[in-house]
Amino acid sequence: MKTKIETIKQAINAAVEKGGKQQAVTLVAVSKTYPAEAIEEAMACGIFDFGENKVQELTHKLAVLPDTARWHLIGHLQTNKVKYIIGKVALIHSVDSLKLAEEIDKQSAKSGIVTPILIQVNVAKEPTKFGFEVEEVVAAIRHMATFKHVQIKGLMTIAPFVDDPEQNRPLFKKLFALSVDIEKQNIDNISTKILSMGMSNDYRVAIEEGATIVRVGTALFGQRDYTV
Ligand SMILES: *Cc1c(COP(=O)(O)O)cnc(C)c1O
């Protein structure tokens, strides 16, 4: 795993260089379906940010792993499950409705905390994917900016799986442009500086286009086994 991590980190640095945006990039290791031991091995190699897409798996893992791990919820979150993760995750990447943001606000208020979130944008307009349409994002953010217990930190997108990662470049460009646009509007209490985009297949292209968080699973941990 050490070699894989080194290779990915070098690829990240090369992509930042090539893209010319000079941004800092956080590697989130997507640990869904992998056992706690795999996460411990990654931690021993200096990786501390982990992405999970299911609440139950996430809460199980955070209970058994050292609290130096930082957890990122990257999958669709049902409102009735919000209460289980509030105060336990570093960042929720997948806020895809006003109703969900409202529930995160409510549960965070109960715990007396402010929860950092990203707004998921369905840039590719895939009918099967969650997220706001590009055209809806500004209005949604203006609404959420009034919530006192959520803090919008940026935008996230899940690009389609494609053979050639270049095919996703226009989507990444679009999300970057949207974030710049929103940043210019200086909306109180919100920022869109974090851009969570790019996975194993296309993280290099995403970084060239401005990603500040990449979510990498298989390139780091190997193929997932969904049968277990
Ligand atoms: C599984 C998953 C990833 C990681 O995908 P890989 O192709 O294994 O790198 C990234 N983001 C989300 C939202 C995921 O569900």
Image (tube, rainbow, N blue to C red):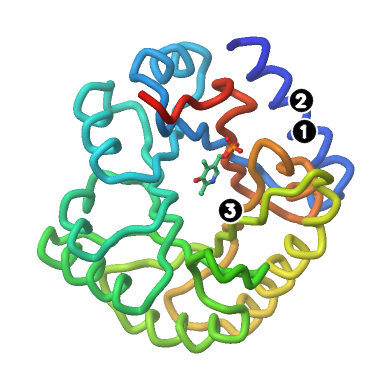
Given residues 163 and 18, the one toward you in this image is 163
Say what amino acid the circle numbered 1 marks: Asn
Q: Are marks 3 and 1 in contact (CB under 8 Å)?
A: no
Number of other residues with Cα within 10 Å of mark 1, as a class: few under 14, some 14 to 19, many 20 or more: some
**Can you identify the residue that label 2 sits on?**
10
Question: Farthest residue toward the left?
Answer: 110
**Can you identify the residue that label 1 sits on?**
13
x then y, percent, for residue 211: 68, 52
Given residues 206 and 70, the one toward you in this image is 206
Q: Secondary structure at mark 2?
A: helix
Say what amino acid the circle numbered 3 marks: Ser
x then y, percent, for residue 35: 36, 20
In screen coordinates, is 62 left or right of 112? right
Q: Are marks 2 and 1 in contact (CB under 8 Å)?
A: yes
Q: CA distance from mark 3 to mark 1?
A: 16 Å
Name which residue lies at 63% across and 19% down.
Answer: 5
Q: Mark 2 or 3 closer to N-term?
A: 2
Say what amino acid the circle numbered 2 marks: Gln
Dividing the picture into quarters, in which one does residue 216 lie? top right
**Can you identify the residue that label 3 sits on?**
196
In screen coordinates, is 28 left or right of 97? right
